[in-house]
Amino acid sequence: MAIDTFMVFTGVYPDKESAEADYDAVKELFKETGLIDAYDAAVIERREDGKVKLGKKHETPTRVGGVLGGGAGLATGLVVALFPFAAIGGGLLALTTGGGALLGAVAGHAAAGMSRSDLKELGEQLDAGQAGLIVVAVSDMESRVREALKRADKLAEKELKVDQEALAKDAEEASSSS
């Protein structure tokens, strides 16, 4: 069982534009280092009606979501684990569809890789702002990612352990059952 360790960063922002600016800074950081496949990121926005909407996202193409074509990475998986009814694009996530099954598999692994108290803390942290940014990055980039998230009002970091082989197997099963 090959367990990979990642760092999860959650930034809380006063507005979507600030979260997107840090999203762009993280994207540029990984582009400059040539490690574009070493992170996932997702911007979330709390709408006026209180619902959470998933905005810009980067999913590592060489990990499960990209390989299977579902576009579901660990950052999006954490958004779904923290906010099960998050809206993606124009529609609400329906975990009964084929894409939803894949997303559910990724969300389950993302949530299982953290303690319940860490998940609760991240959810509460993100609840406090108008926008948020979740970055899941390889652990050796921790300090550089932290520096890139300079616009956040609050920043939390947690460790995430993921069994990539089990995730790939579950995602494959979810995709083939649709």
Image (cartoon, rainbow, N blue to C red):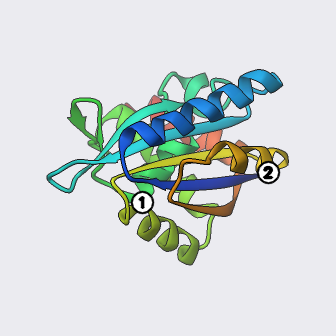
Q: What SS does tag 2 mark?
A: helix
Q: Residues within 10 Å of mark 2 (few under 14, many from 20)?
A: few
Q: Is residue 72 above or below residue 34?
A: below
Tell me the kind of residue under disc 1: Leu
**In front: 88, or 34?**
34
Q: Which residue is rendered at x = 62% and y = 47% of the image?
A: 149
Q: Residues within 10 Å of mark 1 (few under 14, many from 20)?
A: some
**In front: 127, or 88?**
127
Q: Is residue 106 above or below residue 59?
A: below
What x and y, as percent, mark residue 107?
A: 49, 50
Quarter occupied by residue 94: top left
Viewer-side label of 2, 1: 2
Q: Which residue is rendered at x = 54% and y = 48% of the image?
A: 151
Q: Which residue is mark 2?
A: 143
Q: Which residue is mark 1?
A: 82
Q: What SS does tag 1 mark?
A: helix
* 57 sits to left or right of 115: left
Q: Is residue 81 above or below residue 134?
A: below
Mark 2 vs mark 1: which is more N-terminal?
A: 1
Q: Which residue is rendered at x = 78% and y = 44% of the image?
A: 144
